Amino acid sequence: LMVKVNFIRDTETISVDMPVGRTIMEAAKELGLPEIPADCGGCQACGTCHVHVDDVWCDKLKITENSLEQSLLEYEQGYIPGKSRLACQIQLNDDLNNVTVKLRKHELL
Ligand code: FES
């Protein structure tokens, strides 16, 4: 089963179909998005897969309070409570078809 994942960069939307069970970080890698280098390969250590969840998806993609993910994100540039997530910690399921996240500007771009 495939679900569609959308990334917003300014006014542009970039989409890819991914199998359920993969992560949003893996979707970004599939597209080769430079904003998500995902240096640690998804083990919740680098913070380089930080995205802002689109408003309509924030409820569904709430971060677990006091999680390792949250403690990492709190030190990240551009952290927004309720919107910031590590893309490698969002696993795709049927409910997430058409999920949309915003890419953050990358200093190296
Ligand atoms: Fe490193 Fe997500 S890829 S924290």
Image (cartoon, helix red, strand yellow):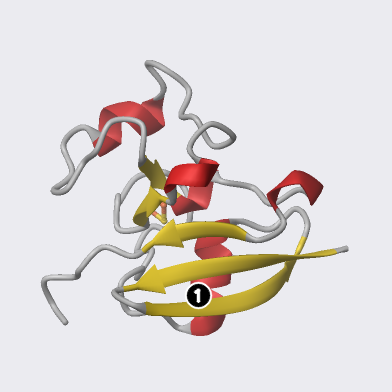
Residue under the image location 52 percent in, 82 percent down? 31
- Residue at disc 1, secondary structure: helix
Is 65 positioned to the left or the right of 95 in the image?
Answer: left
Q: Is the residue at mark 1 in contact range of ligand 1, meaning its CB lies under 8 Å from it?
A: no
Q: Is residue 41 visible?
A: no
Residues 75 and 7: in front is: 7
Is 83 positioned to the left or the right of 99 in the image?
Answer: left
Residues 101 and 106: in front is: 101
Residue under the image location 28 percent in, 31 percent down? 81
Circle 1 residue: 29
| Residue type (three-letter) at the residue carrying disc 1 | Lys
Rendering quarter of residue 68? top left
Say above or below: 45 vs 26: above
Can you say which quadrant of the picture contains the N terminus?
bottom right
Say above or below: 69 vs 18: above
Q: Is residue 108 visible?
A: yes
Say above or below: 44 vs 87: above
How dense is the environment of label 1, judged by Cα within 10 Å: few (below 14), some, or many (20 and up)? some
Residues 11 and 43: in front is: 11
Residue under the image location 38 percent in, 57 percent down? 40
How many numbered dots are placed on residues in this image? 1
Q: Position of residue 47 (x, y in %)?
A: 30, 50
Most distant residue in the right direction:
1
Is 56 positioned to the left or the right of 38 in the image?
Answer: right
Rendering quarter of residue 27? bottom right
Q: Position of residue 32 (x, y in %)?
A: 45, 83
Most distant residue in the top direction:
66
Is 24 positioned to the left or the right of 52 in the image?
Answer: right
Residue under the image location 33 percent in, 77 percent down? 11
Q: Position of residue 48 (x, y in %)?
A: 30, 58
Can you say which quadrant of the picture contains the C terminus?
bottom left
Residues 66 and 59: in front is: 59
